[in-house]
Image (cartoon, grey):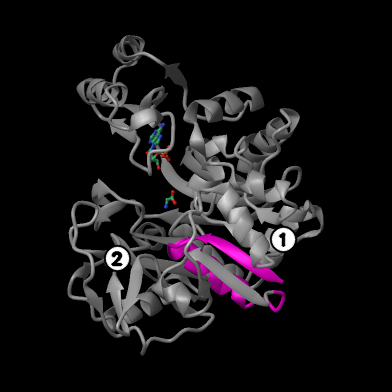
Amino acid sequence: MNILILGGGGREHALAWAVMQNPKCDRLIVAPGNAGIAAIADCAKLNIEDGAAVTAFATDNAIDFVIIGPEAPLAAGVADDLRAAGILTFGPSAAAAKLEASKAFTKEICDAAAAPTAAYGHFTDAEAARTYVRAQGAPIVVKADGLAAGKGVIVAMTEDEALAAIDDMFGGEFGEAGAEVVIEEFMEGEEASFFVLSDGQTVLPIGTAQDHKRVGEGDTGPNTGGMGAYSPAPVLTDDLAEMALDRIVRPTIAEMARRGTPYAGVLYVGLMIDKGQPRLVEYNVRFGDPECQVLMMRLGAQALDLMLAAAEGQLNEARAEWADDHAITVVLAARGYPGAYEKGTPIGGLDALPETSHQMVFHAGTIEADGKILASGGRVLNVTARGDTLQEAQARAYDMVARIDWPDGFWRRDIGWRALKK
Ligand code: AMP
Ligand code: GLY
């Protein structure tokens, strides 16, 4: 079959790498892709948030299956347009993508599904929000309702911080995304991510992961999109995963179906685990980035079969075959990230690195110019490896990192520490 993947980050490189290994894939196009993806698939320029343009492109290129990577095209309804044109698509409808695109909507679904999550208030004006914060006290979490590229959540340790966040959000700092605000109880515990596929009815777990959001070693410093990840997440034991499925995930999928907006695609379930109980932190309607890289390392070619089954409504017949292994990914970022950084700096040493089912460098933000690989974003490379143990996977990944020649890049040297400490 001819397959189109939308997106151009490390997540989409990992998806492309897994899909290409499946003999069902005859031709793969990734839009827009990046320099790493261009080495294994065709890349195309396309406005991926324009449903009509994507549908026309898919039709012109005889695409049989579209996989949508990022949240923006999902929230914009690109999956709806493709399906309306009769093109098989992996990714939720705009109505179902509200599970990521609106925090207030997710809270409403949790209420209806009786899914455990933080207590909250939902506000459309600043004065009511301030009154709520003063009544609740700190720590407290202030969230812009809409999509804010991971920046719309302020975990306020003091009341003043929370009040400032409210002013920023209603003052327009996050644009439309901040026109409504959700204020939540601060939850203690350890975070882990649980990934499931759904075809609207059936739920199939496909793995657990933890990421490192802070830029600095020991999980310190400003938040980022993620500086590394590993799978599985030891904190998410089989019992806890079963609890999360029973109390949170299946009731959510049932509630979405009951409303006539069934959820089909991958659901990223962000959990807080405390005292042996899982509570929902957030949903994302896509694979995590960089969590996807470790999941694809472990799933390999069957990822395509599972995504097809989800898109075709046949998940009840699908099974995920797991090796009892571990995968880790280390993010190499441009010096200065998540603040200002330079673009266009050259990266050497990549050609000599192994590309096997155990070791792979996924590109997140690169371009090729005159035969050289140049950094083109903040997070630039995802050095990914698997092994029988997390230690082994970690040693393999850092061995590859050491062979990359990029003076303008940096990375954390402690990815996986929380799991290795256990
Ligand atoms: P979100 O975009 O909702 O995942 O929030 C980003 C991050 O903020 C999460 O990954 C958590 O680390 C933190 N966070 C969000 N909500 C809460 C909460 N209610 N209690 C504690 N931490 C939270
Ligand atoms: N790594 C966090 C995310 O993809 O949202």
Question: Does residue 161 appear left or right of residue 212 in this picture?
Answer: left
Residue at 47% over, 80% down: 39
Residue 18 forms part of the magenta stretch: yes
Q: Which residues are magenta?
A: 1-24
Is residue 364 on the magenta stretch?
A: no
The residue indicated by pointer 1 is 308
Look at the image and tell me whether residue 126 can be seen.
yes
Residue position marked by numbered label 2 in the rendering? 376
Quarter of the image where the N terminus is located = bottom right
- The residue lying at 31 percent from left, 51 percent from top is 224
Of tags 2 and 1, the one toward the viewer is 2
Where in the figure is residue 419, as x and y percent of width and height?
Answer: 41, 59
Mark 1 neighbour density, 10 Å: few (under 14) some (14–19) many (20 or more): many
> Quadrant of the rendered structure where residue 364 is?
bottom left
From the viewer's perspective, is 215 left or right of 177? Answer: left
Mark 2 vs mark 1, CA separation in Å:
32 Å
Q: Give the secondary structure at mark 1.
A: helix
